Image (cartoon, helix red, strand yellow):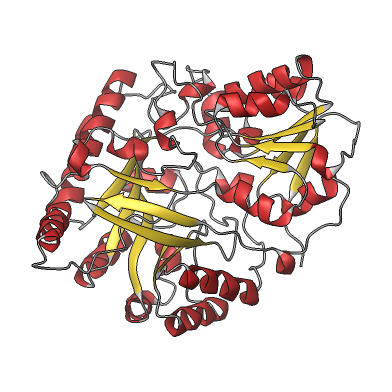
Amino acid sequence: MKQQQKVTYLSQSRFTPSPERVLVSTVCRDVYHDSRDHSKPSSITSNGFQNGFGEYSTHLPEEHKFFTNQPSYGLSFLEANVIGPTYLHYPESSELERQMASSKYEVLCLSAYTWSLPWAIETAIKAKNTYGFKEVWLGGYAVMTDEPLISKHFDRLFWGYSESSMNQAIGKEPIEIQDIRHPDLSTYAYFLGKESTIGHVLFQRGCSNKCTYCADPVFNPGGEPCLSFSEIERVLDHYKYKNIRSIYFSNQETKMHTVYARSIIDAMKKREMRFGMLTSFPALLAKGHDGIKELHDNGMNFLLLGLESLDESNLTKTNRRARSKMMYDTLKLLRDLKIILTTTYMICFEDDTVEKIKDAKNKMIHDLGVTVNLFNITMPLPGTPMYWEYKSKQLIFDWNWSRWTGNHLVWKHPTISPEQAVELLAELRAEVNSPVHNPNVRSIWQARQNSHNNIYTHDYDNSILMYP
């Protein structure tokens, strides 16, 4: 069973470097720190991890902030499976510069997001012109961007998870999916005074959904086979050895009602582990409400669900399979089961208005039982159907890729100005995720305060912050 991986060759050299002559790096942790209009670096910690919640709590007072320290999924999988290259995980710029100047390497491979593409291009130019690198390769979501400078300064583009194609690029054999080794993805989390460590697991990668705004179905389409069950057992044992008892399945769409997933649930029960997952409403509801109750009875106590919008028009236009009634009914059940719920939500869809967004905010606070909501401004990510539609209609006005973070409105919305979008985003992040305004968050905050006084230990421990 082969991995579904793709390489785009921008130059025809087909150069094969020695493995030890390849330097691989994520974006630097201090990138854009001197830029006033760039807010994304809050998602990278000073000690070289991703903070998947950093930008979502910037408008909260210090005592209410939440954050994670999580390794890069893509680079961690590469390092565990492609042996020989040197890997830099969110290094400081000075460290990357030192490595490039060492004369030990002839190929530089950069992993970049859309917002860090300007950094990647600048680094590629420096690698070739200053340090004499023969080739520079690019991976990550930035490869989806139709930026002309990419073809000028890069030699290869790697799409999706690229262990097999990367191994072949350095002169080794392809890697079959059943031979993939799962890396340690232990993630430290902090929420409302509680520290915990979650073991992240991906047993199947790729997304089969067709949402028009999402990069994953284009960058890493679904259909890839699952990792070997023995490998999942090995990583669960590794987490157990580290005294980690809470597992988070971070597949793009985790399907826990399959025979394979049932075996994983049994394996976790044997190890006395609880779990949560990133999933969609249709995947969660594959066996109806009874299926959700069964998952809960088997240890599921937290979820990350893509809510995205409460407006039926937005859901239809973006090919969302979930509909508002389905989502409302499911959220009520999750609330009744006391399953901790984190959701993602996008504002400024085409049919959104200021009034609709504020109404949705009130519903999330008072009606839906959401604990944490991760808000972003709708962005036509390069390569997606939404991007090609908006570009053809000449709706995109901001071509500074460093601002494509989900914190700015980069296209011409029919009723909402860029300034209003930023204000709305701040309002939602400050209120929905705050114990001052959200009664669900407030109950956790109060319970945590009580537990510090040894009066009451809340069942939510180790189950709030779990994903990138």
Q: Horizontal and vertical percent for residue 270?
A: 45, 85
- Residue 430 visible to the viewer: yes
Query: Which quadrant of the structure image shows residue 10?
Result: top right
Q: Nearer the viewer, residue 240 or 409?
A: 240
- Residue 194 lies left or right of residue 197; in this view the side is left
Q: Horizontal and vertical percent for residue 154?
A: 75, 27
- Residue 146 visible to the viewer: no
Q: Residue at x 44, y 49 (%)?
A: 468
For the N terminus, the quadrant is bottom right
Q: Horizontal and vertical percent for residue 53?
A: 36, 43
Q: Horizontal and vertical percent for residue 441?
A: 17, 53
Q: Residue at x 11, y 56 (%)?
A: 449
- Residue 73 lies left or right of residue 284; in this view the side is right
Q: Residue at x 36, y 38 (%)?
A: 54
Query: Which quadrant of the structure image shows residue 127?
Result: top right
- Residue 98 lies left or right of residue 307; in this view the side is right
Is residue 238 depicted above or below 44 in this figure?
below
- Residue 273 lies left or right of residue 56; in this view the side is right
**Exactly how many numbered labels are in the figure?**
0
